[in-house]
Image (tube, helix red, strand yellow):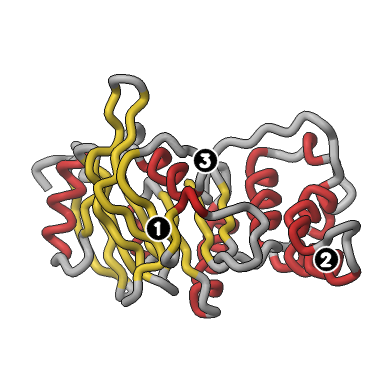
Amino acid sequence: MIATISTKQLSFSYGNDIVLRDVNVSFPKGKLSIILGRNGSGKSTLFNVIAGLEKRYDGQVTIGDVERRKIKIGSSSQLRLGFLNQFHQMTFPYKVFDVVLTGRASFSRFSPSKEDHEAVQAILKKFDLEHLSDKPYTELSGGERQLILLCRVLVQQPDVLMLDEPTNHLDLNYQMAVLRTAKELVKEGTTVLCVMHDPNLAYMFGDQFYLMRDQSVLDINGLEREEVRNLLEETYELPLLSIEKQGKWMFIPMLNENQ
């Protein structure tokens, strides 16, 4: 498989605090790749480097065949990269429709077109959010904001979609809706890279799996279920049961370590 995203000897530090050390990993084209790991393990830092939000790294990051630092915003010759990170602040009460519409900015040189408005209407309808169109973004719940920001990314029609904890703040129904949408995009040819905490959601929807630990990324594809369970136990410092249901792996915390 051709790697759409890859790193070579990637390292990153905050002062003397080393977060990533000599990371060599490839995320294949046209797959939903999921990075698991504990809080503070470096998942979001890796995400930010690949997304171009952090440029002070050592080593190489390539998307397609282009080094990340050379990818210019708005260049039509490059892959279109869309990303949704965990934290977003907006203080001005823009209407929800207008917030999503800003995702189409790169398509319109002067003002939004009819096609831009139709794209926004379609994505809001997809998530059953049309009733929020005229509501101020600042009045939304945390889960609603997360969904609106995801819609804003999706109307960009990215070739590569990066999601940092996309199910945070969402109820179970919307968690399923978001991850099903990610799977649909993969079937259409989009490459999706997702950072997650929950291994069960990961193994329910993902194609490729990786684990952040010891300042690096471990490729855990091809391992047996019990091997993955052992790695997850070591990483999360929690005894786990591993089972298979509906053809998917699940890892359940033990209530009693003698189970």
Q: Circle 2 sits on which residue?
A: 116
Q: In the rendered structure, which amino acid carries the disc numbered 1?
A: Thr
Viewer can see residue 214? yes
Separation of disc 1 and disc 2 at Cα? 30 Å
Q: Earlier along the polypeptide chain: callout 1 or callout 2?
A: 1
Q: Earlier in the sequence, mark 3 or mark 1?
A: 3
Between tags 3 and 2, which lies in front? Answer: 3
Vertical comparison of 44 with 89: above or below: below
Q: Tell me the crowding category of disc 1: few under 14, some 14 to 19, or many 20 or more residues within 10 angstroms, Cα based.
A: some
Q: Is residue 159 left or right of residue 227?
A: right
Left or right: 10 as drawn, with respect to 117? left
Quarter of the image with the N terminus is bottom left
Residue denoted by label 3: 53
Disc number for residue 92? none
**Residue found at x 16% / y 50%:** 231
Query: Does the residue at mark 3 contact the one at mark 1 (Cβ under 8 Å)?
Result: no
Relative image position of residue 28 (x, y in whole percent): 36, 69
Q: Which mark is residue 62?
A: 1
Does the CB distance between marks 1 and 2 fall below 8 Å? no
Q: Quadrant of residue 65?
A: bottom left
